[in-house]
Image: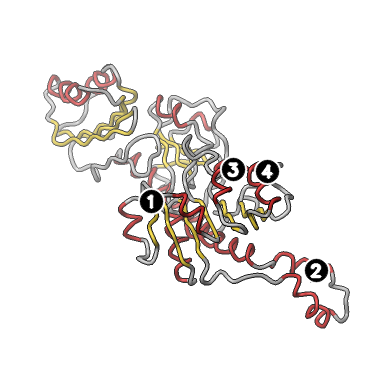
Amino acid sequence: MTKINCLNPIADCGLTLLPADKYEVTADVNEAEAILVRSASMHDMELSEKLLAVARAGAGVNNIPLDKCAEKGIVVFNTPGANANGVKELVVAGMLLASRDIIGGAEWVKDNKEDADIAKTAEKAKKAFAGNEIYGKKLGVIGLGAIGAKVANIAVRLGMEVYGYDPFVSVEAAWGLSRSVKHITDVNDIYKNCDFITIHVPLLDSTKGMINKDALDQMKDGVVFLNFARDILVDEDAMKEALSAGKVKKYVTDFANPNIAGVENVICTPHLGASTQESEDNCAIMTAKEIRDFIENGNIKNSVNYPSVSAGPVETAGRVTVCHKNIPNMLTQFTGVFAKENINVASMVSKAKGDYAYTILDTDAAVSADAAKALEAVDGVVKVRVIK
């Protein structure tokens, strides 16, 4: 019986995919072999030796100590694309809110609700809330992953002229992009030419604060900038200066903090990007499938600290998985262990990601306790798990 702990509420449509005869949801995190989490911070948690995996029901993993987990052989999963449509729709809403003063108009109606002649008054007042259409405007999309690609495609269908920048765009994402999206190789061209700019890149050392004063100075006067990725991708002090100077017409962000909340010409929502029932369901379903395939077959898909490795369902007499350092001569030592035990390795698949690697070995006989201990003793091995 595998014990699962949910640090945050996880939709039942996901949990029901973990059959009760094999999985038990426990309130004791120290007993759990897998943790399902959404936004709860794990940085100050003691990680139990029993813990095998953490699955984040969402894309961002800044609430999880990735390096610490990798060192302990704890595989961290996320759910890329599961909430992409929800975020995409909010980005479109953000463009419309920034183009037309819908919020101001709605507030005016609320403030004048006692006016018996409000319909007539509104005809005079509405000119104060006039705006522009997004049709025909230039949109720059920085980052063409699961969300960025969807934003680019829907913007094309809304009649916008779309420019996309992503030096690391995946083949899968490229195939899914509309042919009408113009591929840009220099992000500065987006800064200089676009009426709207939206950012959809992961938070890395290289992207932190990338929207700084230099980037903002290059932008067109009256640009609308949208940030539904991570708040610290943007230098908010520089953004406030640009707003005050009129360089940026509106800054639309999904990340409320004391530095930006209430600033004039900022439209800020309380991290609503993935706050739809559909997104939560999709994330829950994906996390459950990832955990189940990992626990039952040892396969890894959508990990952020270990490589994606799959050997399919277990069809041999034995299977063992090894989390290990990405250093030379590891595979030879693994097969040597089985040779000494007179166990034939039927197949093996191994991949590396940064400092760590993951290997699945299928054997023609059950993996003995002695063989597992011998694998654990190999210098550079982090964790060994006998699947069968």
159 or 321: nearer the eye? 159
How packed mark 3 is, by other alpha carbons closer than 10 Å (few <14, some 14-19, many 20 or more), is some
**What is the spatial separation of the Cα atoms under label 3 and label 4, in whole angstroms?**
20 Å
In this figure, which residue is indicated by the disc labeled 4?
257
- The amino acid at mark 1 is Thr
In this figure, which residue is indicated by the disc labeled 1?
185
- The amino acid at mark 2 is Lys
Point out the frontmost of discs 1 and 4: 1
**What is the spatial separation of the Cα atoms under label 1 and label 2, in whole angstroms?**
47 Å
- The amino acid at mark 3 is Lys
Point out the frontmost of discs 1 and 2: 1
Point out the frontmost of discs 2 and 3: 3
Q: Are marks 2 and 4 in contact (CB under 8 Å)?
A: no
Q: Is residue 195 left or right of residue 329?
A: right
Badge 1 or badge 4: first in the primary sequence: 1
In this figure, which residue is indicated by the disc labeled 2?
110
Badge 1 or badge 3: first in the primary sequence: 1
Indicate the position of residue 264 as horizontal and vertical percent values: 73, 53
**What is the spatial separation of the Cα atoms under label 2 and label 3, in whole angstroms?**
38 Å
Q: Residue at x 28, y 40 (%)?
A: 309
In this figure, which residue is indicated by the disc labeled 3?
213
Disc 1 secondary structure class: loop
**What is the spatial separation of the Cα atoms under label 1 and label 4, in whole angstroms?**
33 Å
Indicate the position of residue 286 as horizontal and vertical percent values: 42, 50
Q: Is residue 300 left or right of residue 256?
A: left
Disc 4 secondary structure class: loop
278 or 296: nearer the eye? 278
Badge 2 or badge 3: first in the primary sequence: 2
**What is the spatial separation of the Cα atoms under label 1 and label 3, in whole angstroms?**
21 Å
Badge 1 or badge 2: first in the primary sequence: 2
